[in-house]
Amino acid sequence: MLLVQFKTEAGQRRVGVLEQDAIRVIDGYATTYALAREAIAAKAPLELVAARAVGSETQSFEAVAKAGRLLPPLDHEDPAHCYVTGTGLTHLGSADTRDAMHKKIGGDVESLSDSMKMFRLGVEGGKPAEGARGVQPEWFYKGDGSVVRASGQDLPMPDFALDGGEEPEIAGLYLIGDDGQPYRLGFAIGNEFSDHVTERQNYLYLAHSKLRDCGVGPALLVGELPAHIEGSSRIYGKDGQVRWAKDFVSGEQNMSHTIANLEYHHFKYGLFNRPGDVHIHFFGTATLSFADSICVEAGETFEIEAPAFGPALRNRLALEETKFTKVSAL
């Protein structure tokens, strides 16, 4: 099941089930958040609760998307109660990339860079037996719900940034129940979006490079994540032509960590178990246009697509003018 959030022509929020190009509107629930809270309270699968509430009204997905009325597939009415985070160095990549990576990490561990040490740790201990704790991954914070952009919205790059590059990833979408338990609603395709030039200057700048907006959606895949995901990442120039394109793979079959292990090491912190909060957590990638020396320019468009997640995620890169913030003393 694929869930989509959108606004009607009158500006009212709606959530519905995507069936090819038709959105079947769910009755009685205006948001994915409300639907998920009902499922948690009823101790019932989200898919079952959604299926029972589907009504007769339909909307054209294409019409909604063209009108710019799509919303992220999960959000919180107060953006401060939505955490956007992620993990890196989690993907093995294609067969040739995988072989090269294993050669890099196969020697003396002390001769490896910190990144390669982290990747090696994941390869050796990122997939523990069920119920066991594996090695913890690299982790980063991107922002709160205010940084999340729906498909069709611009993806702003601050004017102090040195780069604005896509990262085609899968994100887990979660709601913390009143019992303090994290509940996974499902998964969505995403563009994690980072400043790779800043990060490459010094790895300790990673935290700065991740404080950027991101694209998520348009649909939430309810249920388990397929073990193997195939997708495509593209950049369209200002003339509308494809300037760069590359396939990517994800899913546990192509990762050095299990989803369960990544989830454990995020939600083990009490800070992330506050009832009512939403979490959007990116699981990493192995495919970047930056790695092919592509510099994306304002006005160009990112497109990330994987059939398992329905329609593609599209965001145009825009330059955002920022002001110098001077702190005033009281």
Image: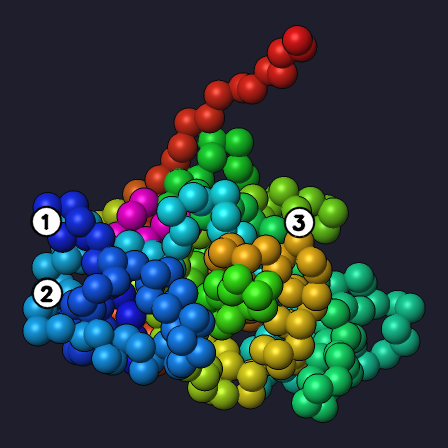
Residue that numbered label 2 is attached to: 59
Q: Is residue 149 magenta?
A: yes
Mark 2 or mark 1: name the one nearer the start of the chain: 1
Report x, y in % for residue 160. 53, 31
Q: Which residue lies most toward the top here?
A: 330
Residue 184 numbered mark, or none: none
| Circle 2: residue type | Gln
Q: Secondary structure at mark 1?
A: loop
Examine the rendered structure and indicate whether residue 228 appears above or below residue 81: below
Which residues are the magenta region? 148-154
Report x, y in % for residue 263. 62, 71
User: How far apart are the alpha carbons under marks 3 and 2?
Assistant: 42 Å
Q: Nearer the viewer, residue 182 or 318?
A: 182
Camera sees residue 170: no
Mark 1–mark 3 contact, CB under 8 Å? no
Q: Secondary structure at mark 2?
A: strand
Camera sees residue 262: yes
Mark 1 or mark 3: name the one nearer the start of the chain: 1
Query: How many residues crowd mark 3 within 10 Å: few (<14), some (14–19), many (20+)?
Result: some
Residue 98 as seen in the image, left or right of residue 290: right
| Circle 3: residue type | Leu
Residue that numbered label 3 is attached to: 206
| Circle 1: residue type | Glu
User: How far apart are the alpha carbons under marks 1 and 3?
Assistant: 41 Å
Say which quarter of the image contains residue 115: bottom right
Where, quadrant-wise, is the N terminus in this rendering? bottom left
Residue 16 as seen in the image, left or right of residue 113: left
Query: How many residues crowd mark 2 within 10 Å: few (<14), some (14–19), many (20+)?
Result: some
Q: Nearer the viewer, mark 3 or mark 2?
A: 2
Most common secondary structure along the magenta stretch = loop
Residue that numbered label 1 is attached to: 9
